[in-house]
Each structure stands twice: as C-alpha cells, then as structure tokens.
Amino acid sequence: MKARIVVSAVCVFDDAGRLLTVRKRGTGMFMHPGGKPEAGESAVEAATRELSEEVGIVLQPAELELMGVWIAAAANEAATDIEATVFRAPGTWTAHPSAEIEEIRWLDLAALARNAAPPADLAPLLTDHILPELAASRR
C-alpha cells in the first residue's frame, strides 16, 4: 500500500482568469499553494495559513470555498499519494513567492482548453483532477 500525505491546497486566480501554480525550492513540479496541516489545524485553516506563508495572500478560513477532496500521486515524493482538500479563493489576486516557494507561474486556462495538453511539469492533482474540474465548470 502506498503512503498517503494529507494536504490542503487552494485555487487562486488573477484578473485575467489564470490559475496560480507554485514550485517549491529543490523540486521540478508546479502545484497549488498549500501544504500539510499542523497539529490541531483543520483543512481550511491549513489552506489559509499556507496561502499566506507561501504567496502572501491573506484570507480568513470562512472566505475559502470548498471544491472537493481528491486522491492523487504526490508530485515530489515517490510511491506516495496525497489526499488533497482543495479550496477556491474568491476574487482575483496577485502573488509573490515566499517561504519555500522558488517560483510562481500563472496558468492560462483558456489557452490550455485550446491546446488540450497541459505542461508536463504540473502535479498530478492538477492534471488529473483540478484542470478537468475547472474545464467542466466553465462549460
């Protein structure tokens, strides 16, 4: 049986409708901002804390909208799955890399819909679950 890590992640959009992705220092894959909950922290509390720490976006837990919970292969850890509770941040945002974030990249969802092939350096949670979910909700 594969190991499983529980994480929270947040879909953040800019004013052009692009989705924020981040790459952590020392890794090659882009993913949502987010991470593991600390002791006693709920999924939504972890999501808001990580969002603030990683990209400087400050929200209250009640402001995040639950999108769902998915199981996916971990992007940067072999033979491991993640159980990700994914939220959506309301509104539009700017972001800057902080903490362990080396780089941010905004994904143009309209261009992805036209090209049909997402970049090869996206985490499985994004390619297998979130991008199809967002595409379905835009129809």
Image: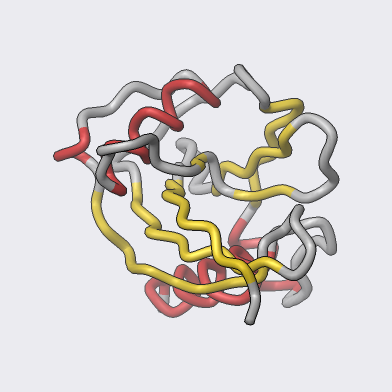
**Residue 38 position within the rendered picture, expressed as x and y whole percent measured from the top left:** 38, 35
Q: Answer with the quarter of the image where residue 27 lies.
A: top right
Kindly identify the residue that appears in the image at 43 percent across and 46 percent down: 10
**Residue 63 position within the rendered picture, expressed as x and y whole percent measured from the top left:** 19, 39
The N terminus lies in quadrant: bottom right
- Residue 38 versus residue 108: which sits nearer the camera? 38
Q: Is residue 49 above or below residue 134?
A: above
- Residue 112 versus residue 8: which sits nearer the camera? 8
Question: Taking 12 as reference, is 26 left or right?
Answer: right
Kindly identify the residue that appears in the image at 45 percent across and 74 percent down: 133
Query: Which scheme is used to colour this image of the protein?
Result: secondary structure
**Residue 74 position within the rendered picture, expressed as x and y whole percent measured from the top left:** 67, 62
Kindly identify the residue that appears in the image at 76 percent across and 53 percent down: 76
The C terminus lies in quadrant: bottom left
Kindly identify the residue that appears in the image at 33 percent across and 68 percent down: 68
Q: Residue at the front extreme?
A: 1
